[in-house]
Amino acid sequence: MDAKQLKQFLQAEGATLVGVGDVTKALPKEIVHLNRGIAIALNRSLTKEAVDKLVRLQTLTEGWLKANGHRSLSIPPDSDRRKDKLITKLYRLFCHKTAATCSGLGWIGKNGLIINEQYGSKLTWATVLTDAPLGADRPCVSSRCGDCDLCVRHCPSGAVQGHLWSLRNPLREIVAYDKCRSLKSGRTALKGKPNCGFCVTVCPYSRNGAKK
Amino acid sequence: MADETRKKEILDKLRNGVIQYDEDACREGAQEAVAEGLDANEAIFDGLVSGMEEVGRLFEAQEYFVPEILMCADALYAGLEILKPHCRQMDLGVKGSVVIGTVEGDVHDIGKNLVKMMFDVAGFTVYDLGRDVPLDKFVEEQLKTDSELVCLSAMMTTSMVGMPKVIEKIKEKNPNCMIMIGGAPTSKELADKWGADGYAEDASNALKEAIKMVAFLKKLRDEKAQKK
Ligand code: B12
Ligand code: SF4
Ligand code: SF4
């Protein structure tokens, strides 16, 4: 089956990036048969419009796969916020970052976010898992942050510690999320908004992405 | 509901909506059923539930996997939500109070929820403990609410083995309480063997059984009161 055709189709429909990854190693037993992860990204922040657009792209992907006789499971961009249904229980079994790295669209930066060469972390992601034997892209196996440590120095909560990510140890905790969270909830209480995200704004990759 | 073919059309829409995990179709079918005066109980059991039975078959044939089943269940619930308020309120002369839940280790609650719905419709007071319920919780809740009836549901051969333990404990603390079990792997034989007072193979029969049991209990109580 032709992955290229699917990518072109989704890009024509407005996707910023589309990749196909072999996610076999990251699958829990409930969904072992869905071993291809289609990562779809939009160069927007996680707004309602972006979510709607990504969900539409996922629906198109599902339709395309079904027409070719294959199963699929869409993990929506805001998967952590959805709780109202039974199927939402499966969402936390799979993380968008895995599909993105497995399909070579980015690595996990020192800031714990997906960093794409071109857009940095200014992307919103969605995943469609499928059993269609699509040709997989070459995965990103290690961090390309190198010696840069801008996000480490600018993080006000000390959450970003400077660990380099690698596919060999994909689950290592790169960012101390409890620190980040407590800083943000403190600010939300004070100002009504979390007001941080330095780890995104200082990243040279993200700044490049913003210029375009 | 006048037309038989139209009725079949709606039932098929509900059934296929569940099978094809199409929530919109289930909602639409349910709305049509309500608008055109189709009996809500019939729409649920001959439409939605009959679809879920086919889903079970597809799962066994390995044509469906866990994600499909969850989506089918979501579709069933989408239709159920609309149909439930339209279920006939039945006045069956007897009302009781019942503790219900799916036993520890088992998250299958679709069947349990249907049984619960039948109790609601019949005006029973229902204490729903949900699913994957620790065995002792049934005993506690029965004592706390002094319910006449405890209903245990299990869908797996591995989880149903918890049932005799609950039955024994409840009977020890409160011999007058009646216990009914159900769910696909259970049977009348098992119910008898484990000392349960009742068994039913589906939700409507569960209600019939329950009414029989509660009526029996009330009669016992009345007789006792008279003797005093
Ligand atoms: C839907 C489903 C699921 C859904 C459940 C969603 C939910 N919220 O309920 C999900 C995907 C979560 C699921 C998970 C699993 N499932 Co499952 N699942 C099913 C399936 C396909 C349908 C069950 C169903 O809802 N039927 C429809 C309802 C309406 O029918 P019902 O439950 O039988 O209820 C009716 C009667 O039994 C009766 N009744 C029910 N309760 C009570 C109680 C009382 C007191 C009374 C009187 C009557 C009564 O009235 C009801 C209405 O008329 C069955 C297959 C099948 N053919 O049954 C497998 C099945 C039950 N699952 C099975 C298995 C193995 C699993 C998993 C281990 C699978 C896995 N690999 O992950 C997990 C287990 C999780 C756990 N620990 O519980 C096996 C059990 C095997 C066994 N004998 O032990 C089955 C039989 C499939 C199979 N052939 O292997 N499953
Ligand atoms: S959001 Fe702020 S506190 Fe959290 S990791 Fe980024 S820079 Fe640090
Ligand atoms: S700021 Fe530097 S170290 Fe941090 S994620 Fe971006 S490239 Fe990596």
Image (spheres, coloured by chain):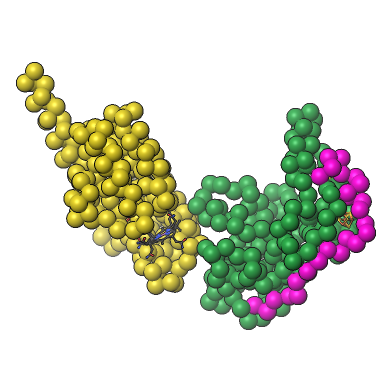
> Which image quadrant: the C terminus of chain A?
bottom right
Q: State the extent of the magenta-drawn residues as a range.
A: A134-159
| Drawing shade for chain B | yellow
Q: Position of residue A181 (x, y in %)?
A: 74, 40
Left or right position of B41 against B27: left
Left or right position of B208 against B21: left
Q: Quadrant of residue A77?
A: bottom right
Q: Main secondary structure of the magenta part?
A: loop
Identify which residue is drawn at 69% across, 76% down: A136
Q: Is residue A152 above or below residue B51?
A: above
In the image, is residue A140 part of the stretch drawn in magenta? yes
Left or right position of B67 against B106: right
User: B107 or A203: nearer the eye?
Assistant: B107
The reply to whether residue A167 is in sight is yes
Q: Position of residue A163 (x, y in %)?
A: 83, 55
User: A94 or A72: nearer the eye?
Assistant: A94
